[in-house]
Image (cartoon, grey):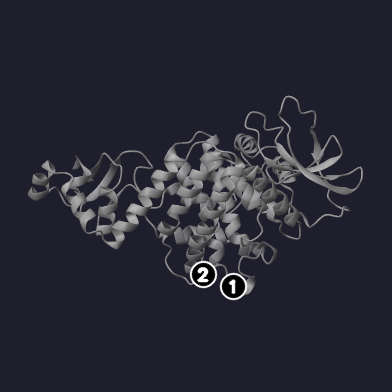
Amino acid sequence: MLKQIPVSQLEIGMFVHKFEGGWFDHPFWKAKFVVDDDEKLAAIRESRLRGVVIDTAKGRDLTPPAVAAAAEPGEAAEAAERAPSPAARRIRSIKRRTDAQLVAAQPVSLAQEVETAAQIAEQARERLGKVFIDARLGKALDVRKVEPVVSDILASVRRNPQAFSGLMRCKLKNEAIFRHALSVSALMVALADRMKLSGPEIYGSGLAGLLLDIGVNYLPQTEGLAGGDYRARDERLWQSHVLLGYRALQNDDNLPPAVLDACLLHHERIDGRGYPQGRAGEDIPLIARMAAVCDSFEFLLAGSLGQPPMDPAAAVDALRAQTGAFDEEILRLFVETVGLYPVGAFVELASRKIAMVIDEDRKDPLRPVVQAFYSLETRERILPHRVALAEPSEKERIVGIADLAGHDLPADDQLRELVFLSACRNIVHA
């Protein structure tokens, strides 16, 4: 029997069937579970929820003391405040952070968001590292460890859709395996938002992005270096990572089915030539079709199978050239999300200068903000300067993707980091 009660009446042993409130009104990503410890109970009581629906067939019903206590709904919270446990303090910390994210979710510039994105990335790296290590050691996965990562990335993407992905694209210090997971998660969130999916679906998309390649951690370590490119070793071995990851995630029976679908099926193709099941068209779940685009884009940026890393704009062109691989409508929306010239792309301007895209123009994605730093006429570096191509008075325009070969410039990845971070610092301190 389902019964709606205020959070003040919730007790250990009750089965929560539904939360009465918004997606961000509580610190949980799953909505159906038994309240089996003080930590969960404190989290719900201190949340912004209006109430909960309990299922008395699966857990405890209201007891007379709880009914009597309804007249004083603040009593339990006041008692917890007088003698807070470590768990209660941690829950309050999570709640304060969530509240701060909601307040700060107003749009900001890429330069303003980069510093926050860097802090999120570092914290996320630590959390993901623990999950990946557990996987390598054969331990059961605790998906709850990465829940805060999804919330933080979602908040960052909503403040600025390009900052987190742009930072991951241009920053060197993050190891490849973590950078890939974080980048795909941010792209999945931004794409899901562009597709106008619901809050839980956007959240699930971000979680799927983090866990898509968790199966790589179960591949034999003798076959490749940790975080290395297993695809270059043995194609069948590499393909097994989707099933290995799927089986590992199945152990969490509260994980959204869409996340499992994304993990298992993100290498399927629309034309039916993918793996592991050879599905085609709409027989591939929506979230897996989304993941196929985001995951492939990030692999192109990283380089693989003897191919050097691609420029972000070249990677967009490469995705569009893969006939039969992707859902055309999803790919179109993805290109709208990252832009024809994504942050980090090196472009040639009409003035014969080389520049790098450092921000988007939300009203005119074909004319982003760039940082010019090299003259093709003099073959010399020039004083870096920002050019907002969409400004009405600006006559400059992009003529194509820049070829950096043969010029006295640092390696592409080093140059990308230097230009991106220096441009952001200059804007912040201007």
In the picture, which quadrant includes the N terminus? top left
The residue located at (54%, 49%) in the rendering is 116
* Residue 326, x across and y down, in percent: 63, 42
Expressed as whole percent of the image width and height from the top left, the position of residue 16 reads: 26, 48
**Residue 330 at what x, y percent from top left?**
59, 37
Which amino acid, by three-letter code, is at mark 2?
Answer: Arg
Question: Farthest residue toward the top?
Answer: 392
**Which residue is under mark 2?**
136
- Is the residue under label 2 in contact with that under label 1 (CB below 8 Å)? yes
Q: Which mark is residue 221?
A: 1
| One can see residue 28 in this view | no
Quadrant location of residue 415? bottom right
What number is the disc on residue 191?
none
Quadrant the C terminus occupies:
top right
Q: Residue at x 81, y 38 (%)?
A: 400
Helix, strand or loop at mark 2: helix
Q: Residues within 10 Å of mark 2 (few under 14, many from 20)?
A: some
Residue at x 40% of width, y 46% of height: 98
